[in-house]
Amino acid sequence: MTLNLEIDGRACQVEVDPADSPGQWRIRVDGQPVEADAHLLRPGVLSLLIDGQSFRIVLDADPNAPALHIGAQRIPYRIDDPRSLRSRRRHVRTDGPVTLKASMPGRVVRLLVKKGDVVAIHQSVLVLEAMKMQNEIKSPKDGQVRDLRVSAGDTVAVGDILAIIE
Amino acid sequence: MTLNLEIDGRACQVEVDPADSPGQWRIRVDGQPVEADAHLLRPGVLSLLIDGQSFRIVLDADPNAPALHIGAQRIPYRIDDPRSLRSRRRHVRTDGPVTLKASMPGRVVRLLVKKGDVVAIHQSVLVLEAMKMQNEIKSPKDGQVRDLRVSAGDTVAVGDILAIIE
Amino acid sequence: MFRKVLIANRGEIALRILRACRELGIPTVAVYSDADRAAPHVLEADEAYRLGPAPAPESYLRGDLILEIAARVGADAIHPGYGFLSENADFAQMCESSGIKFIGPPSSAMRILGSKTNARQAADEAGMPRTPGCVHGLASPEEAADVAAGVGYPVMLKAAAGGGGKGMRAVSRPEELPAAFASASSEAERAFGSGEVYLEKLIERPRHIEIQLLADEHGHCVSLGERECSVQRRHQKVIEEAPSAVVDPDLRRRMGGAAVRLALSAGYTNAGTIEFLLDDEKNFYFLEMNTRLQVEHPVTELVTGYDLVHLQIRIAQGEPLPFEQKDVQLRGHAIECRIYAEDPANGFMPSPGRISRLLQPGGPGIREDSGIYEGWIVPVDYDPMLSKLIAYAPTREIAIARMLRALDEYVIGGIRTNLALFRRILSDPGFRAARIDTGYLDRFLADAPLPLADSVDGSSAIPAVAAAALFEATKTIANGSALRDGASANAWKTVARREAVGSID
Amino acid sequence: MFRKVLIANRGEIALRILRACRELGIPTVAVYSDADRAAPHVLEADEAYRLGPAPAPESYLRGDLILEIAARVGADAIHPGYGFLSENADFAQMCESSGIKFIGPPSSAMRILGSKTNARQAADEAGMPRTPGCVHGLASPEEAADVAAGVGYPVMLKAAAGGGGKGMRAVSRPEELPAAFASASSEAERAFGSGEVYLEKLIERPRHIEIQLLADEHGHCVSLGERECSVQRRHQKVIEEAPSAVVDPDLRRRMGGAAVRLALSAGYTNAGTIEFLLDDEKNFYFLEMNTRLQVEHPVTELVTGYDLVHLQIRIAQGEPLPFEQKDVQLRGHAIECRIYAEDPANGFMPSPGRISRLLQPGGPGIREDSGIYEGWIVPVDYDPMLSKLIAYAPTREIAIARMLRALDEYVIGGIRTNLALFRRILSDPGFRAARIDTGYLDRFLADAPLPLADSVDGSSAIPAVAAAALFEATKTIANGSALRDGASANAWKTVARREAVGSID
């Protein structure tokens, strides 16, 4: 089968088909052949031998943002399989307005910008206290604060909209 | 629901029904009520609180011989649920003739009894070499060797009949 | 010997104390909040009782409930661990008056040394060097400004009841002081129920060196050497080690001696730690005392060979210390990494949730004090520390290499952790050369901010792509779509059959 | 430093060596048989290559293939671990002649000390006490009878190339000798490819005490103290500890000195162990030398603080020993349990198969050198050792308590193991008082044979019944049968919904 894969920012096309002998796979990455000996140890834990190089790869199965653990690395990827539902889900867009949502329940300690401010990418927008820690919520892009939906002292739940940056 | 349970050789009847609040169960063992707070951590790993006593219990799921791990103990049990297939499977009978089968592949090193010999329970019948170890296969009962199906040097596979004791 | 010990804590430290009690043959009682019904300390204890809802003030901080349970179940001692009630002198006193042994110092000593301001007064009396600044709580921003002017900027505002970097603010210019005073005070109020803050001169690029003490109830007090905890993020310790690369036997003896004098002067007993700042001329300044077991106690256990929690319990039982100062020998080097459920690539945002996969390291010289298991749901309600990974080896160099080896083996799936951060720090030439101070990590992160995701190094690019494709491919076998591929249909059918037995080979 | 090390072994020891190489920054090459494609040592190595079919003679004993792979992938050293090729002088010589470093002694020293009969001759030359008996292989049962008559019964027949109790027979009466000779010889032939056996007087109720040696290639040899391995089943070590409870500093010095002399006399280098029998008057007799790393080396590492595999590699690289005899200090006490896939309740029958559930112990003082993971299928083709669980503590008493604590935490599901056996031994007053000898365990098992299943102790009878019922009940929710129970149907429907999210609360 053929899959379109986006990994570490790079897109590539992968053809993957089982070879005749157990565990052997014929894989082509952007047309380049790769001989892989694959063995699934437990669901989501894979041993790969490629030209004798050994890799233990663990799937971090989050339907929205799947990732691989290889050694100490954690590598997110995205599948654009025309048959796969996942591809219909869109990647986080950074052009146009972006909605800043609370990724965890917490309490807004203070706001660091006000509506209309111009913000740079990774600039802190507000401080959220959660799990006994004060956490600065940063802007995912350069832009302008089009809206602020919370104020200091507010308690927020997961998914609550905090701000909109355009 | 009501289950007939055989555990550690003792048979008992258990009624088990969920109480109203999550994790709470109404359990009666041979009519005696037990208030249990149960939480399944992963499939087959259970936390039980009974009158404040804490138990971590792990299911050793072998359909033929299920067992429980509690602390350092391993406790086999058998369910006689009229609805459960398992109950139709019979327990190993020690009355009448018993067939001694190879529980693992190996090589017969030597025979310690011959056809017609009278043997006591746990008396060694033959020596099987497997996993680099010589293992004495013992009689499960007092009786007489009605048949010996192997001789020294034979290689045996799992399930091969070694001897029949009556 | 104690009949039964109640552990008034949760997470890895509750488990660590449970293990010590079991090794000493003492039955254990765990307490838990609604968020922790399935927590490891509940599973491993002999008995476990519910305290209340998830928020700490309604559960782990309910000293009244905890004492009630202890009395009801016949526990004659309580171990508070660290955090929660561990430095609460009122709770210690409640234990004393209800005849239940508090495994820690007497409340009287806690009142003297537990409050940072009182401790600074005690330090003066014991003739121990401390940072310039006030020894009393500040009534107002104005008073703060006066003291700051006296010692000179930059200065540090601190919560008198504080710890763990909460209620702490560095101030470099007078105009910043009022705002810093307000936020430090309010944060302290929320964290410790007391807004009292004091002020001290900020030592430039200090190292954080602390001395571990053990004092029995017969007037004997020994020092178990130092720990270096200079690798901190926003005043939170991240990596600790023992011994310190810069402390020589003479300095160790002088710091240890000063620490012992202060503890004895306050009638201190059980385990305690005196924290110092060490400047670049190796002058040391008393910072504060932690009147409890520290998170990082394992590195001291590994280099001294003693078990601090065993000794805490034996001291609380009235036993004399089983050794003297001259018996304390340091051997080898130990490093601890605090594994947190947080996302370093995203402003260290906490990352609670279900641990979907857990592969833990092991083997020679690796100790893990963990509070998690595969399937455990990390609650949002408490400190996000998951585990302490500790490496011990004959030398610091090998201990670092060993820790890196263990980090490579460690996989935590389902939530984000700071595992990758440690790999970066332990590979940094500055850290490897022990050129560290309390500002080291914040500078390191500013100089080299973490990428939003690990970038694939050359060697693992192809395997990563192949693995992603294989996971996807074998997954789609389930819904059979792959089998409609015509060409390789047969091969796929074979795979599908193998899949049925849970393996793709 | 070595460019690349090939590990010619499998299981926990291959993994342990891999970890050491990684810590030293040396790339690793694993080799595997068809039974081990998914084995831990294959997963953790940098490179892995197939040797052949599962049987050892077609894979792990194929020295020719292993050397071929080493040459092809550019490995300049081979670590043999223990067992397999580790004591094969011919293989060591093949390595030498092909310019690949064999991490172990030179083949010349292996020929002198590896053969039990040659070693006994060397012992005589080094003036080391040994058991009475012959120093040459026996040509016939008749010759055996003559020697036996000379030293007097009971006697012990042993394989000259032997180890691990294979090819070993105790003989108490002359008439038993011919049969014992035949079976010992044939077992030796199968196990080691040599049927040569010799005979020695059987010491009554001896302790097994062995001395760990390290010798560099510059003529320095040190002793790292002793291990006691008296707890054996059919001559197989089951529990090992360091130090021995009965060896005092003087005896330790005398045994260590004798061991060093013998090693130096044979030009021995790298790690090696000299095994002694100790009689009840504390006389020691040379038994044999193991010219390799021992299974039980971790207990020595814990009490000395040295890493034996690191030192093996550094010695093989030509480095001098980084310490001297006077630097070797023992601290604390370490105990090792060999966890086997076998069923003690059923004649210790090996129990291969899939490990369906694995909960491993951790925390203070616990080290596990393991060769398994959840889901791993233990093959029938090799020694059934799964893992080594090691407990370290300040005293023997606490080390035992700690091991018992860890055993309680340890769950291996899907196969049978000897975990419960250790719980029984470590609770036995005889073992706790260190009243042990090489016959201790066989007597212990004869006196108190293990039940076919653990009998439920009072406290866990009710929970066991409740748990079994709950597992069954929640299982039957799947096929909905419980939902037809009428009365409690609604409650069950709630449970069924909760089940969907993988929890019954």
Image (tube, coloured by chain):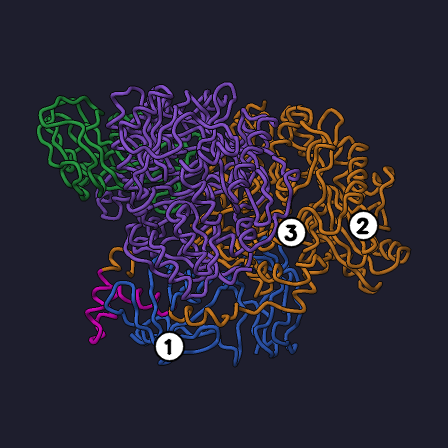
Chain colours: A blue, B green, C orange, D purple
Determine which quarter of the picture holds residue B26.
Answer: top left
Judging depth in this view, the residue of D126 and C234 nearest the camera is D126
CA–CA distance in space, label 3 to label 1: 43 Å
* Percent coordinates x, y for residue C108 in the rendering: 75, 31
Asked if badges 2 and 1 are on one and the same chain, I answer: no
Crowd tier of the residue under label 1, counting other residues whose Cα lies within 10 Å: few below 14, some 14–19, many 20 or above: many
Residue C212: x and y, percent?
A: 71, 40
3 and 1 marks on the same chain: no
- The boundaries of the magenta stretch are C468-497
Label 2 residue SS: strand
**Residue indicated by mark 2:** C198
Quadrant of res D360? top left
Which disc number belongs to residue A29?
1
Report the mark closest to the observer, 2 or 3.
3
The C terminus of chain D lies in quadrant: top left
* Residue A31 vertical placement versus C120 (above, below): below
Give the Cα distance between marks 2 and 3: 37 Å
Q: Describe the element under mark 1 as helix, strand or loop.
A: strand
Subunit of label 3: C
Residue D225 sits above or below residue C425 on the image:
above
Q: Residue C396 carries which label?
A: 3
Seen at 27% across and 69% down, the residue is A18
Frontmost of labels 2 and 1 is: 1
Whether D389 is among the magenta residues is no
- Real-space CA distance between mark 2 and mark 1, rounded to the nearest whole angstrom: 62 Å
Residue C289: image x %, image y %? 75, 42
| Amino acid on which disc 3 is placed | Arg
Amino acid type shown at disc 1? Val
Q: Both on one chain, marks 2 and 3? A: yes
Helix, strand or loop at disc 3?
helix
**Amino acid under disc 2:** Tyr
